[in-house]
Image (spheres, rainbow, N blue to C red):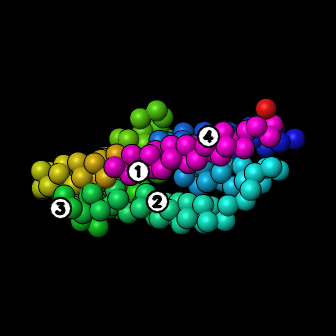
């Protein structure tokens, strides 16, 4: 039974890593649930502090995942139209795999800025670039965090592995 729980928790952690790159899946929360499942395994001491701290970081990263692309748009001179365009483009881009989730925020910000001021395409392009940079930064943060959770998983299984293997 313990091996089954280990496999299920590992699948959650790996799905979280995939979700850190694909916006359709909430990567960090899925990886955190994998870690939580791991700590329900008999023979592994439940670590409230580790789970609590990683949960707080998970929440912060989920919030930042929406804030960073919008702030990238804003910092590069975008308006609220560009920020809304970024978010709408991200959602619409999910329906156009494999690159829609990358191109969507860029095009959304660009179109949003053109709606705001159709005569200033340079500013619209600059805001769209900021959106893209924000998206890449957000994805990088999520990926690194999910890899850290994978490292915690591996460390915990290694530490308590003599119980099962």
Instruction: Of the two numbered discs 1 and 2 on the same chain, state the one appearing first in sequence.
Output: 2
Q: CA distance from mark 3 to mark 1?
A: 23 Å
Residue at point 39%, 46% (across, down): 140
Q: Which residue is mark 2?
A: 61
Q: Secondary structure at mark 3?
A: loop
Instruction: Of the two numbered discs 3 and 1 on the same chain, state the one appearing first in sequence.
Output: 3
Secondary structure that dominates the magenta span:
helix
Q: Are marks 2 and 3 in contact (CB under 8 Å)?
A: no
What's the mark number on residue 77?
3
Q: CA distance from mark 2 to mark 3?
A: 24 Å
Q: Nearer the viewer, residue 40 or 65?
A: 40
Callout 4 crowding tier (Cα within 10 Å): few <14, some 14–19, many ≥20: few
What's the mark number on residue 154?
4
Q: CA distance from mark 1 to mark 2?
A: 8 Å
Number of the front mark, 3 or 4: 4
Q: Secondary structure at mark 1?
A: helix
Is residue 143 rendered magenta in the image? yes
What's the mark number on residue 141?
1
């Amino acid at each position: 039974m313990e091996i089954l729980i280990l496999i299920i928790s590992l699948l959650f952690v790996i799905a979280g890593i995939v979700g850190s790159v694909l916006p359709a899946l909430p990567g960090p929360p899925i990886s955190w649930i994998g870690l939580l499942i791991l700590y329900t395994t008999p023979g592994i001491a439940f670590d409230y502090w580790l789970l609590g701290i990683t949960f707080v970081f998970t929440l912060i990263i989920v919030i930042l995942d929406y804030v960073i692309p919008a702030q990238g748009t804003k910092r590069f001179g975008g308006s609220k139209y560009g920020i809304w365009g970024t978010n709408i483009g991200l959602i619409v881009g999910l329906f156009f795999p494999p690159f829609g989730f990358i191109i969507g925020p860029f095009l959304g910000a660009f179109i949003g800025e053109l709606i705001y001021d159709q005569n200033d395409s340079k500013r619209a392009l600059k805001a769209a670039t900021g959106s893209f940079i924000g998206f890449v930064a957000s994805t990088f943060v999520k990926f690194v965090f999910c890899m850290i959770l994978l490292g915690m998983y591996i460390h915990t299984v290694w530490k308590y592995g003599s119980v099962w293997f």
